[in-house]
Image (spheres, rainbow, N blue to C red):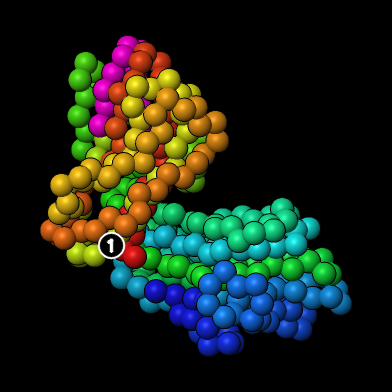
Amino acid sequence: MADNPGFETGDTTGWAYWSNSGTPFRVESVETRSGNYRLTHYSNNAAYQVVTSQLKTVPNGNYTLSVWVRSSGGHNALRLFAKNYGSAVELQANVGSTALTSWTEYVIPNIPVTNGQIEIGVYSNANANNWAAFDDFYLTRNYVNNPGFETEDTSGWMEWHDAGLAQRVEYGGQYTGSYKLVHQHSAAYKQLTSQIQTVPNGSYKLSAWFRSNGGQKELRLFAKNFGGTTELQANLGAASVTSWTRYDIDNINVTNGQIEFGVWSDANANNWAAIDDFILIKK
């Protein structure tokens, strides 16, 4: 959905720029992630600031923005951003000062567009000889309703439990935004949180971020009822997940115009899992 997302025109067609001095960026045909070109922010003369961005007209809804990055490190600030989407809040995925020796994906998972447009881009505030390379911007519709639980509840989601309700929406400690979903109970429990979405047929990717104290009998992200007979899964199992980690189910071939997806826990007393920022995108 982004214009010229991999700079395969050989230039910055479709993109605008701002800098505090000169033009500290270029399109290069070296060490790309895919295709023949990439964007590079760089100056060997002096410290610099530069923004590369574009403003897109899009239907209202939830969107996901991502880009792949390599970097020398040492930046004062380096980030992917989304703004002017109907809120005064700029959403960011911060790369920061870390050196990235291999291509690494940065994602803004939940952008609620309400004004029919979105401004996307990357910003560098760097010292002389700091460089950052960017390739393969993706701006895609996220088909999940209430993907980050920012309604402060489970609006848009269904649930099933056995002995007692073992899900809640909590403030704080989230991956992004202000809220997250938690599965937990003081006794052994089974808890399902899911939703069914009507979508165009095609190939999809489902993702969500997890943390967990481990010990569950079963803990998984799943997709089913999409026209295939097999439930597709990303299994966490009994593993402890101490930092937010993304789990993916790729190549979901929807043939019946719908998909059911969610998270399932079969857990012992006081096992907990935190889940945030579901993404369902058409590839």
What residue sits right under mark 1 in the picture? 203
Query: Residue at the spot x=69%, y=67% of the render?
Result: 132
Vertical position of residue 217 compared to residue 109: above or below: above
**Residue at left offset 40%, top offset 16%:** 270
Q: Is residue 274 visible?
A: yes
Closest to the observer: 10 or 175? 10
List x then y, in percent, for residue 180: 41, 37
- Does the magenta segment cover residue 8? no
Residue appearing at x 53%, y 72% in the figure: 34
Prevalent SS, magenta region? strand
Residue 42 in the image, given as x and y percentages of width and height? 75, 74
Q: Position of residue 114 (x, y in %)?
A: 35, 64
- Say whether residue 33 is left or right of residue 46: left
Q: Is residue 167 above or below residue 40?
A: above
- Can the viewer see residue 170? no
Q: Is residue 59 left or right of residue 40?
A: left
- Considering the numbered disc 1 on the image, is that residue within a helix, a strand or a loop? strand
Quadrant (top left/top right/bottom left/bottom right) for the N terminus: bottom left
Identify which residue is drawn at 59% across, 57% down: 104
Kind of residue indicated by mark 1? Ser
Which residues are the magenta region?
Answer: 179-192
Q: Looking at the picture, does residue 36 appear above or below residue 212?
A: below
Q: Is residue 183 left or right of residue 88?
A: left
Local crowd at mark 1 within 10 Å, few (<14), some, or many (≥20)? Answer: some
Rendered location of residue 60, percent (x, y): 31, 66
